[in-house]
Image (cartoon, grey):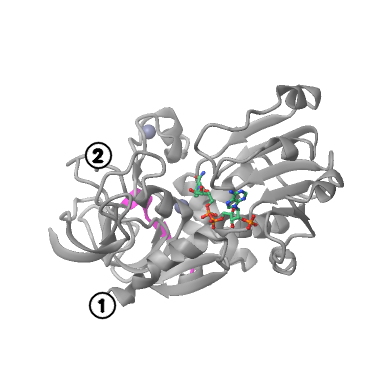
């Protein structure tokens, strides 16, 4: 057992994320032990630390956008060796035998995938602790290879914000000639703009925040619509083939439905609560619209996305912080004051 690993944890819904020391399990035969270098700050970290989804198991050590170097490997590990630059995303295990797992869709594992934090280990039932910490032990199948071309700091958010936006854009076959809109310009939104643009779509950003127009264009949007401006919303009625909605809170989806074409699709990645206000079913029926959702992406697809980013020169726009600044980062994230992902330099753990 690796004793006295330093990390940061939330001890309750109302306490700030603060220093916390814990142990990591001994390496099993198929485990990889990773010294963490960088960890992105996802809005999910905040949702879970503050128990906004009602499922927090305290202490919560958040962090699932992890980049690190392999320190040691178990006796059966063949694909990684000490010194390799690797990534870990939102999952660290799954059953590996159900139909979704067999298709490489571990995030939809019928037994429930083991999340990087706030889950229980499948074997010893110990709590999983995430990347706001010095090291992590992960089953080999859930470790990603970080291509040499990627800068490790700006690659960290690819492990969640990257794959969560890449996967639905691929699944719904976004590409050349399509008009695609992204709702919300935060960590996920900025990657969605980059990917949709790289895939050849004509991209629009819906934002509540005036002042993000220039930035959105730099990130790949051709057009920006201020969603609180009724005239601007009306001007894009019936325009889009596909909308990816990254907003983290309940909000009215009906104005966005009006901007979809016949057969248009609205896919949610930010919202886990019930849709409120309700959807006007008539708007769906009259234009054969579907509304769906999408959860991160499978391990093979995450590797594909990392390789795609290396190939296309796609990186995340990050602001580096020390770990003691993470609570301030949460507050800034809530004010949409992030350009566009905070990444913790884990060396600041001391
Ligand atoms: P983020 O960086 O805080 O960005 C969210 C953006 O949404 C904000 O920058 C803001 O953009 C907009 N927004 C925020 N509050 C809003 C409101 N009340 N109404 C309308 N727009 C609002 O968050 P993130 O890290 O990208 O995460 C977004 C959501 O995705 C979170 O709920 C997170 O838990 C979830 N998530 C889901 C998955 C999945 O697998 N499905 C994976 C990762 C994260 P503007 O200022 O441009 O309006
Ligand atoms: Zn995340
Ligand atoms: Zn499974």
Front in this rendered view, residue 303 or 235: 235
Q: Is mark 1 within 8 Å of ligand 2?
A: no
Q: Is residue 144 magenta?
A: yes
State which mark lies toward you, 1 or 2: 1
State the quadrant of the N terminus: bottom left
Q: Is mark 2 within 8 Å of ligand 3?
A: no
For disc 2, the neighbor class at 10 Å (few under 14, some 14 to 19, many from 20) is some
Instruction: Indicate yes or no whether the magenta region holds residue 76.
Output: no
In the image, what residue occupies the spot 76% across and 27% down? 283
Q: Residue at x 36, y 45 (%)?
A: 51
Q: Are marks 1 and 2 in contact (CB under 8 Å)?
A: no
Q: Secondary structure at mark 1?
A: loop
Within the image, what quadrant is residue 266 found in? top right
Residue that badge 2 annotates: 122
Label 2's element? loop
Residue linked to disc 1: 350
Quadrant of res 63: bottom left
Q: Is residue 125 above or below residue 97?
A: below
Q: CA distance from mark 1 to mark 2?
A: 31 Å
The region drawn magenta spans 140-147
Q: Locate residue 332, reporting x and y percent.
A: 50, 65
Residue 262: % across, % down: 82, 31
Question: Residue 161, relative to residue 67: is it above or below?
Answer: above
Q: Position of residue 145 (x, y in %)?
A: 43, 61
Q: Is residue 200 among what the camera can see? A: no
Q: Which badge, 1 or 2, is on the more N-terminal residue?
A: 2
Outermost residue toward the right in this view: 235
User: How many numbered marks appear?
Assistant: 2
| Residue 53 percent coordinates (x, y) | 41, 40
């Amino acid at each position: 057992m690796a004793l006295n690993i330093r990390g940061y944890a939330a001890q309750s819904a109302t306490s700030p994320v603060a220093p916390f020391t814990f142990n990591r399990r001994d390496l099993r035969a198929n485990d990889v032990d990773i010294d963490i270098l960088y960890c992105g700050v996802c809005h999910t970290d905040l949702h879970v630390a503050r128990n906004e989804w009602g499922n927090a198991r305290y202490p919560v050590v958040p962090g699932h956008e992890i980049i690190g170097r392999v320190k040691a490997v178990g006796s059966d590990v063949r694909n990684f060796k000490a010194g390799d630059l690797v990534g870990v995303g939102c999952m660290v295990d799954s059953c590996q035998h159900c139909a979704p797992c067999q298709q490489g869709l571990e995030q939809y594992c019928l037994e429930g995938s083991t999340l990087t934090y706030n889950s229980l280990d499948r074997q010893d039932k110990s709590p999983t602790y995430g990347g706001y910490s010095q090291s992590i032990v992960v089953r080999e199948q859930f470790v990603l290879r970080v291509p040499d071309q990627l800068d490790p700091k700006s690659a960290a958010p690819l492990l969640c914000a990257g794959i969560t936006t890449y996967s639905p854009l691929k699944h719904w076959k976004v590409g050349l000639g399509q008009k695609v809109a992204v709702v919300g310009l935060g960590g996920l939104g900025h990657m969605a703009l980059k990917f949709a643009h790289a895939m050849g779509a004509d991209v629009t950003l819906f934002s509540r925040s005036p002042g993000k127009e220039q930035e959105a264009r730099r990130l790949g949007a051709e057009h920006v619509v201020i969603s609180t401006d009724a005239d601007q919303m009306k001007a894009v009625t019936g325009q889009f083939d596909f909308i990816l909605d990254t907003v983290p809170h309940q909000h009215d989806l009906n104005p966005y439905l009006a901007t979809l074409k016949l057969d248009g699709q609205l896919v949610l990645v930010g919202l886990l609560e019930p849709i409120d206000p309700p959807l006007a079913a008539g708007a769906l029926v009259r234009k054969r619209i579907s509304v769906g959702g999408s959860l991160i992406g499978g391990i093979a697809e995450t590797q594909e996305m990392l390789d795609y980013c290396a190939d296309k020169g796609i990186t995340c726009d990050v602001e580096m912080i020390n770990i003691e600044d993470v609570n301030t980062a949460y507050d800034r994230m809530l004010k949409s004051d992030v350009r566009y992902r905070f990444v913790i330099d884990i060396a600041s753990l001391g």
